[in-house]
Amino acid sequence: MASLVKQYLQAQNLEVLVENGLEDAVMRFVDKDDKDAIKDFVADTLRSVGRDMKSKDMDEDDVEEHVSFFHRDSPSTADE
């Protein structure tokens, strides 16, 4: 199951969500029946990206560049 999830996520174009973190959340959902795992991961990631963008006082024109930078440089899971 883990390899199937990993293979599927690698084929997607994830711009904000980090593959490894989403993979972990999906596996917690499947293996541990954690019904909130994916929702919590997405919420934590968006909160982290939003907090980081606010701290840098971003213009609308800079959002796409910042999201790419955040995705590339973020750890496998979002900061809590």
Image (cartoon, helix red, strand yellow):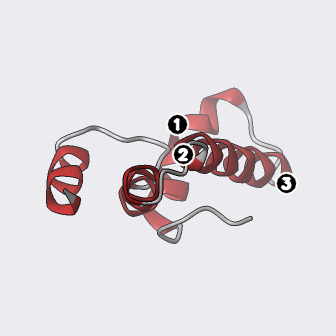
Q: Quadrant of the N terminus?
A: bottom left
Residue for badge 2: 67
Q: Are marks 2 and 3 in contact (CB under 8 Å)?
A: no
Identify the element where label 3 is drawn: helix
Cα distance, mark 3 to mark 1?
A: 16 Å
Identify the element where label 2 is drawn: helix
> Considering only vertical position in the picture, is 62 above or below 52?
above
Direction top: furthest residue: 60
Q: Position of residue 77 (x, y in %)?
A: 54, 65
Residue for badge 1: 64
Disc 3 or 1, which lies upstream in sequence?
3
> Considering only vertical position in the picture, is 26 above or below 20?
above
Q: Quadrant of the C terminus?
A: bottom right
- Label 3 packing within 10 angstroms: few (<14), some (14-19), many (20+): few
Disc 2 or 3, which lies upstream in sequence?
3
Identify the element where label 1 is drawn: helix
Q: Are marks 1 and 2 in contact (CB under 8 Å)?
A: yes
Residue 25 appears left or right of 49: left
- Quadrant hosting residue 46: top right
Residue plotted at (47% across, 59% down): 32
Residue for badge 3: 55
**Hey, what amino acid is under mark 1?**
Glu
Residue 58 appears left or right of 19: right
**Hey, what amino acid is under mark 2?**
Val
Q: Position of residue 70 (x, y in %)?
A: 55, 57
**Hey, what amino acid is under mark 3?**
Ser
- In the image shown, does 62 or 50 lie closer to the viewer? 50
